Image: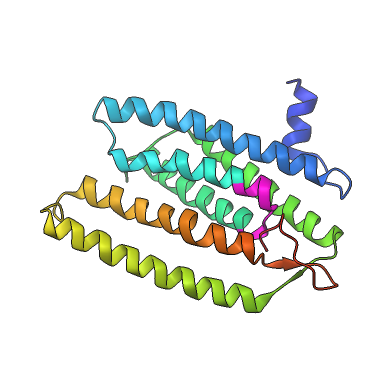
């Protein structure tokens, strides 16, 4: 990739005509970030320098990239941006010796820029297609997801207590993150696929978007 292409990817103008291609590029960028994290964290876990629960990070990046491309979702884009801010804060804290974690500041900054571009691109897509948000669906699905998440958490902790794993921090953190991912994949994704948050002005569901 040439320097001009790199600059255009990170800082180029996002237009309604090219927004779908931009979203596809950003989705691939999240896959690349997932691969980089998987390699780095896999090595650290192998060396016992990082807990296995941290391997959830590349999984979240990959899932985020997939749903960003398939749904062109503002909600997914915002979630990825919040994730980027959180992971970057942890990176900064690790660099200052205040926490454990990765210390690659350049990678953290790139993640924030990619996530911010995702928000911009999905907003351009939403506006250019003249879509509107079905807030009733947002409220109903959010309530269902919250109930499902609580139920899964209760099941996970009950299993951990029954099997004497409740005091194992690595196991509990891995189970907790697993519960969150399971809720997103098994509950939220199917519901928002069947009842997308975005509908056209005529009331027809837009199945390729998330909100």
Front-lying residue, 25 or 110: 25
Q: From this viewpoint, which residue is outermost toward the top?
A: 2
* Left or right relative to 74: residue 142: left
Q: Quadrant of the N terminus?
A: top right
Please state which of residues 163 and 34 is positioned toward the viewer in this rendering: 163
Q: Is residue 140 above or below residue 6?
A: below
Name which quarter of the figure residue 134 lies in: bottom right
Report if residue 175 is visible in the image. yes
**Residue 195 placement: quadrant:** bottom right
User: At 63% from the left edge and 53% from the top edge, which residue is drawn?
Assistant: 77
> Number of callouts in the render?
0
Which residue is situated farthest in the front direction here? Answer: 194
Q: Is residue 139 magenta?
A: no
Magenta stretch bounds: 67-75
- Measuring from the top left, give residue 5's x and y in whole percent: 78, 27
Residue appearing at x 57%, y 77% in the figure: 139
The structure residue drawn at horizontal position 10% and vertical position 53%, both measured from the top left corner, is 164
Q: At which x and y percent is residue 52?
A: 29, 38
Residue at 53% across / 47% down in the picture? Answer: 84
In this picture, residue 157 sits left or right of residue 127 = left
Q: Main secondary structure of the magenta part?
A: helix
Compared to residue 37, the image places residue 22 above or below, namely below
Q: Position of 156 compared to 77: left or right?
A: left
Location of residue 24 with respect to 148 vertically, above or below: above
Q: Residue furthest right?
A: 17
Q: Residue furthest left?
A: 164
Q: Position of residue 172 (x, y in %)?
A: 24, 52
Q: Quadrant of residue 156?
A: bottom left
Q: How is the image coloured?
A: rainbow
Q: Is residue 39 above or below residue 100?
A: above
Question: In the rendering, at what x and y percent does residue 197 appear?
Answer: 67, 67
Q: Is residue 96 visible?
A: no
């Amino acid at each position: 990739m040439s320097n001009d292409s790199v600059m255009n990817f990170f800082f180029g103008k996002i237009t309604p005509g090219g927004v779908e291609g931009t979203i596809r590029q950003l989705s691939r960028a999240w896959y690349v970030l997932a691969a980089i994290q998987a390699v780095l964290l896999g090595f650290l876990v192998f060396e016992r320098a990082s807990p296995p629960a941290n391997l959830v990070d590349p999984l979240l990046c990959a899932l985020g990239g997939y749903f960003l491309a398939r749904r062109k979702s503002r909600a997914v884009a915002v979630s990825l941006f919040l994730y980027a801010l959180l992971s970057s804060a942890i990176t900064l804290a690790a660099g200052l010796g205040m926490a454990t974690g990765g210390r690659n500041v350049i990678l953290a900054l790139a993640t924030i820029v990619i996530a911010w571009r995702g928000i911009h691109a999905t907003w351009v897509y939403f506006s250019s297609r003249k879509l509107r948000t079905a807030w009733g669906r947002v409220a109903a699905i959010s309530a269902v997801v919250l109930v499902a998440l609580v139920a899964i958490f209760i099941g996970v902790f009950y299993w951990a207590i029954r099997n004497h794993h409740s005091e194992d921090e690595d196991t509990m953190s891995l189970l907790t993150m697993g519960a969150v991912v399971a809720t997103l994949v098994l509950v939220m994704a199917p519901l928002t696929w069947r009842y997308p948050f975005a509908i056209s002005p005529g009331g027809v569901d837009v199945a390729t978007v998330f909100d």
